[in-house]
Image: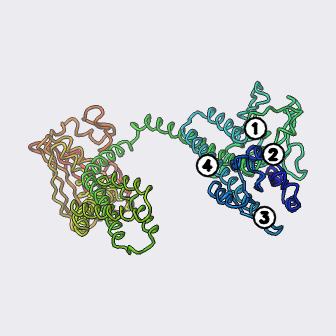
Amino acid sequence: MPAPRPEPLTPLLLCSAAFAGSATAALCRSSGELRPVAPRELGTVVATRRAGRSCIVLLDEHLLCDDGRVELQPVGPTRIISMLPGSGADALQQRFGDVLSSILSPEPGAAALQVALRTALRDAAADDRLLGLEAERRRLAGEITKLNRIGIALSTERDQERLLDFILTTARDFTCSDAGSLYIVEKDASGTRRLRFNNSQNDSLPHLELVKFTIPVSKSTLAGYVAVTGEPVNIPDAYLLDPKAEYSFNPAFDQRTGYRTRSMLVLPMKNQDDQVIGVLQLINRKISRTATLTAADIDSVVLPYDDAALELTLSLASQTAISLTNNQLYEGLQESLVELKQTQAQLVQGEKLASLGQLTAGVAHEINNPLAFSRNNTHLAHERVLKVARRLAVQRWLEADAGGDPHARVSAARAILDKLKEDKDIGSDAKDVIADLGSMPAPKQLELLKMFFSYVSQSREQKEGSLDEVLARTQKVLEECFIGLDRMAEIVLGLRNFARLDEAQFQNADIDEGIRQTLMILSNNARDQGVKLTSDLTLTRPYACFPAKLNQVVLNLVNNAIDATPRGGEVHVDTRVNGAWVEIAVKDDGEGISEANLSKIFDPFFTTKPVGKGTGLGLSISYRIVMEHQGTIAVTRNETAGVTFLIRIPTEPKDPGTRTEGAAKAAESP
């Protein structure tokens, strides 16, 4: 329920004692309170009248001081009707400007005076409305600023109790509430939603001990009703509720403490998912935040909550709910991260995460160079386009019809000068010109602008060349950007082809293309370690497989081979069809594998790499993937150095998963 609007104030009509005793004065009394004042009192009466009250000064020669001056400084909605003889009105016009509403003869006719009064009252009322709108604008701007600051504070506070106490205090400050409380929605052991009375503040009972308790989420109580419906409740008097209301007010607190509850505002705290996670309850809105509330003066101190208070605190409650939800998500995320760190080393997926890290590093390195020069060239092209735009604006202004409206040309030139301020070469000159324009008449302004813009046009052409030349250079820069973007697109396409996220099912795929993309992704790692990557891929058609998983196997084998190969060595990958089998061989000339370890290399967590370097899961994962393809994976030691891993999958496979693992494992090439 909004607060009642104040009664409109009767306009104040100030005049001389002589005018008040005239017959003409009778015409004015119906328009407001006609009050005679002495010349020396005029300014004081105008300045000290009640705020917002319109004031009309009926100025005749009897209101002039002995030296002929008018003792008046207009304040608020004020208008002057002049009834001075001779040239006195001209001096008033120069001094008071628009405040001088009408100029009448010393003895105006009734009709003329009534028209002048209506005009002055209308203008004063318009001034009052404008002042009121400006005050409202400032109030709203201040509230928005406060809300922004509160939003920042809410987003940075991680302690829930401090956050709830802060929001309750802030809501009470905004609404001048004497008391307030907060309920939080929670679930009990059976999963039933309940409201926990969590926070309470009361200026009249500052030492009241907080006792936390829970109540059911039901429409029978005020807080429960708001939690169920998600709608705010604004109550002018808690003891005069609508008999048809579904909720009721519990007077037990008032009876126990002697407190007197009257106006209440109960608000839902809704998060970003429109879920009510709490209820904010404000009690007894006071005429000011510092007013003291007693039972004797409750009628004069306590006000109902208006629509502005409802709208503002509803926004505040929503911000709080979102912040609380985000805090809960943040805490949950922290717990999940801790749990992930504790279990990650024990999961088979840890190897895949390690591989993904290597892929990301390689792709980032490959993308970095084209991204860097594309970004730099884009910024350069942007600067050149801005320069061309500024030069075109100057040129068009110079070529425009000089016989046009001077004020319009000056206005257009000022807009161009605002743009030229951004030019690092002539920005300071543009600012000087803007400063000089303020003290010149329009013709002089045009002369200065023409001289400056001509200088700008000539100096820019000498330094940057013609517009066509600048655009040509810009086009070349953009073409270089396209080259870099095409390279990045090629790299991303390669990564997509490697992952084959849209090809997770068993299907026909180009195995050679998948291997090419895998080698491209690993090329950066190989270069860093001084290892040469070569391939001989000879498959002539697609074959049935799990494309993404097969790429993972090749990635693991080639990555291991790079790590095992000394600087200057070589890793070679080839593919071929051998009878009913597709064969993929990965050969390196590294340090090799001992005879004792050949039988253990496919065991989970077995690794010959230093601690922290490998998880021992890569070959185990590869082995299982090959089993899913109904194939075999074997390793043999080369005659000179290093080893060769040979993968064999059938050219015409049966349904996946029909073979047993025991039929696949081999310690040497079949």
- Camera-side mark, 2 or 3: 3
Q: What residue is rendered at 78% in x and 64% in y?
A: 118
Relative placement, left or right, of 238 versus 342 is right
Residue 288: give its label: 1
Of tags 1 and 2, the one toward the viewer is 1
Residue in front for this viewpoint, 653 or 261: 261
Q: Name the image quarter holding residue 106.
A: bottom right
Residue in the picture at 72% in, 63% down: 102
User: Which numbered mark, 4 or 2, is in the foreground of this view?
Assistant: 4
Element at label 2: loop
As measured in the structure, the alpha-carbon distance from the residue carrying label 2 to the one carrying label 3 is 37 Å
Residue in the foreground of this view, choosing between 310 and 658: 310
Check contact, mark 4 vs mark 1: CB within 8 A: no
- Residue at mark 4: 141
Mark 2 lies on residue? 304
Q: Quadrant of residue 184?
A: top right
Left or right placement of residue 223 versus residue 339 in this view: right
Q: Earlier in the sequence, mark 2 or mark 3?
A: 3
* Residue bearing the label numbered 3: 118
Q: Earlier in the sequence, mark 1 or mark 2?
A: 1
